């Protein structure tokens, strides 16, 4: 059977960006930045993207397009049997992420519906908090919406790479961008908005916590969809001549831009309403309805914003689920639709446990090593498996593959072969990336 492929470099860019932009940008990045001291954290984050994010992304692109296989077989082909472990680790990590990610996507879907029903009309800080708590603690509700989100992802994936992933991202990404801009304009014209901008951009290293560096590293992996083989899987569908160096730069840059735009939409509002910037995961769900309640036609805009956040979450989930789907198709020889079905069932099963384990919901008393099920999935994937995957992926490409082979694949048919940037990049990939991740990782664990 012929392997599927994206149809152009632009589709490659949009699908990859669709994977990168998600709840990580719109939900996680703003609140994590808020909890870790704002601008100083941003600075650390940007360094992580440059020294770690981009090199790991290029490594994944290399592995995927060179072999045109799913992560398990790709590692096996390039490095022999024992390296396929890294592929399996990726599959486990991508599933762990999906377990809690689909729960949050469910909250967003439910918010989309609630805003359509006018539930946020005339909302105040108090009622907004109340709606959020009711949303995440209602057992039937969270599971229903999580399953709906999973069905949408399954539906798109069942239509394949071109007919599903490519078509969905092409339509949805531009709309999301325009909506974030509209929110930004409104947030910036609020009274006191400058306080929020100052908070986001003012660099104060004394506010950094000791855990902030690993958090920034984990976040850069999470936001750029790295460490689990999602980018390996997507790159296995890339066009033959796509310039992997430019694609990774464009994606990293655009992803960072969208995160900043999301921060700019949120922090000025936080300050305008005298709320705590370190509010945590509820930031998006509690402050956004407040912003929109101040806008003319706010109801319509709020609905559109949550609809598009749902879309961002959905396009990101496509890549997470596709890792396992590609595995089942190629290793277990199961057809696409059945593979999608199997993977969706696994995620629904464990994902609902994550959804029900949130503070105030029925399983919140179940603790694994002092953490809820939701937090355990999150911690294991974001703080352990993603960095570990990153070390192995970058060290593999840096030390086990000949340099010329990497260059030839990264810039096939392009004139960038001798660019200084590429050379610097390969040095960083070999001598900085894996070592830096290792140091931060070990320091955090012990
Ligand atoms: N990048 C997505 C976000 O920011 C989440 C995501 C999609 C992801 N694919 C991934 C995270 C692969 C880690 C690995 O929301």
Image (tube, rainbow, N blue to C red):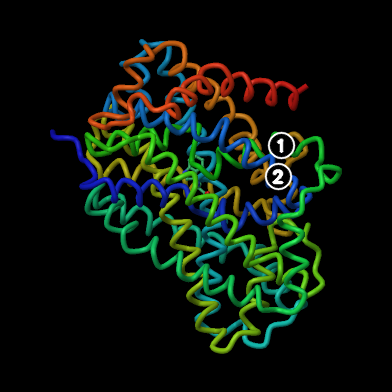
Q: Which residue is mark 1?
A: 368
Total numbered labels placed on residues in the image? 2
Instruction: Using the image, tell me which numbered label, if any, was put on residue 372.
Output: 2
Tell me if residue 397 can be seen. Answer: yes
User: 199 and 228: which one is in front?
Assistant: 199
Q: Quadrant of the C terminus?
A: top right
User: Residue 86, how many percent across, how many down?
Assistant: 46, 21
Question: Can you say whether 155 is above or below 100 in the image?
Answer: below
Instruction: Using the image, tell me which numbered label, if any, was put on residue 249.
Output: none
Kindly indicate whether the residue at mark 2 contacts the one at mark 1 (C-beta within 8 angstroms): yes
Queried on whether the Cβ of the residue with tag 2 lies below 8 angstroms from ligand 1, the answer reads: no
The quarter of the picture where residue 302 lies is bottom right
Q: Is residue 56 left or right of residue 284?
A: left
Looking at the image, which residue is at 41% across and 46% down?
345
Spatial distance from mark 1 to mark 2, Cα to Cα? 6 Å
Q: Is residue 34 left or right of residue 228?
A: right
Question: Can you say whether 442 is above or below 116 in the image?
Answer: above
Look at the numbered disc 1 and give the secondary structure of its residue: loop
Look at the numbered disc 2 and give the secondary structure of its residue: loop
Q: Is residue 238 left or right of residue 146?
A: left
The quarter of the picture where residue 237 lies is top left
Q: Quadrant of the N terminus?
A: top left
Looking at the image, which residue is at 49% across and 34% down?
54
User: Residue 205, how many percent across, how many down?
Assistant: 81, 42
The quarter of the picture where residue 186 lies is bottom right
């Amino acid at each position: 059977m012929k392997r599927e492929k994206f149809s152009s470099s632009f589709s490659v860019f949009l699908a990859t960006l669709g994977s990168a932009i998600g709840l990580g940008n719109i939900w996680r990045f703003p609140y994590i930045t808020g909890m870790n001291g704002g601008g100083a954290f941003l600075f650390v984050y940007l360094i992580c993207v440059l020294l770690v994010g981009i090199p790991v992304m290029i490594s994944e692109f290399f592995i995927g397009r060179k072999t045109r296989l799913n992560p398990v077989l790709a590692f096996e082909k390039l490095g022999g049997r024992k390296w396929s472990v890294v592929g399996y680790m990726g599959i486990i990590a991508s599933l762990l992420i999906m377990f809690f990610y689909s729960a949050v996507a469910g909250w967003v879907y439910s918010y989309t519906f609630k805003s359509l029903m006018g539930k946020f009309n005339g909302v105040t800080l108090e009622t907004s908090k109340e709606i959020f708590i009711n949303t995440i603690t209602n057992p039937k509700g969270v599971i229903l919406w999580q399953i709906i989100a999973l069905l949408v992802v399954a539906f798109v994936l069942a239509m394949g790479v071109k007919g599903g992933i490519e078509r969905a991202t092409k339509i949805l990404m531009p709309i999301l961008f325009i909506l974030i801009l509209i929110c930004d304009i409104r947030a910036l014209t609020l009274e006191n908005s400058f306080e929020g901008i100052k908070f986001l951009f003012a660099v104060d290293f004394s506010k950094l916590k000791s855990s902030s560096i690993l958090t920034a590293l984990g976040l850069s992996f999470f936001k750029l969809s790295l460490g689990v083989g999602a980018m390996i899987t997507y790159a296995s569908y890339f066009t033959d001549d796509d310039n992997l160096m430019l694609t990774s730069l464009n994606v990293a840059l655009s992803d960072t831009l969208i995160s900043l735009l999301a921060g700019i939409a949120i922090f000025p509002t936080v300050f305008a309403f005298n709320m705590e910037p370190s509010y945590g995961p509820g930031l998006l769900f509690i402050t956004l309805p407040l912003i929109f309640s101040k806008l003319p036609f706010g109801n319509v805009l709020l609905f559109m914003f949550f609809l598009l956040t749902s879309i961002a979450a959905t396009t990101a989930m496509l890549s997470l689920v596709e890792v396992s789907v590609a595995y089942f198709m190629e290793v277990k020889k199961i057809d696409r639709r059945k593979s999608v079905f199997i993977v969706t069932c696994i995620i629904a099963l464990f994902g609902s446990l994550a959804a029900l384990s949130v503070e105030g919901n029925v399983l919140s008393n179940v603790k694994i090593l002092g953490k809820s099920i939701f937090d355990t999935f999150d911690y294991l994937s974001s703080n352990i498996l993603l960095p570990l995957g990153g070390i192995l992926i970058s060290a593999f490409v840096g030390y086990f593959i000949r340099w010329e082979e990497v260059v030839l694949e990264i810039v096939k048919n392009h004139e960038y072969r001798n660019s200084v940037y590429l050379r610097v990049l390969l040095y960083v990939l070999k001598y900085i990336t894996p070592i830096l991740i290792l140091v931060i990782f070990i320091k955090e664990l012990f």
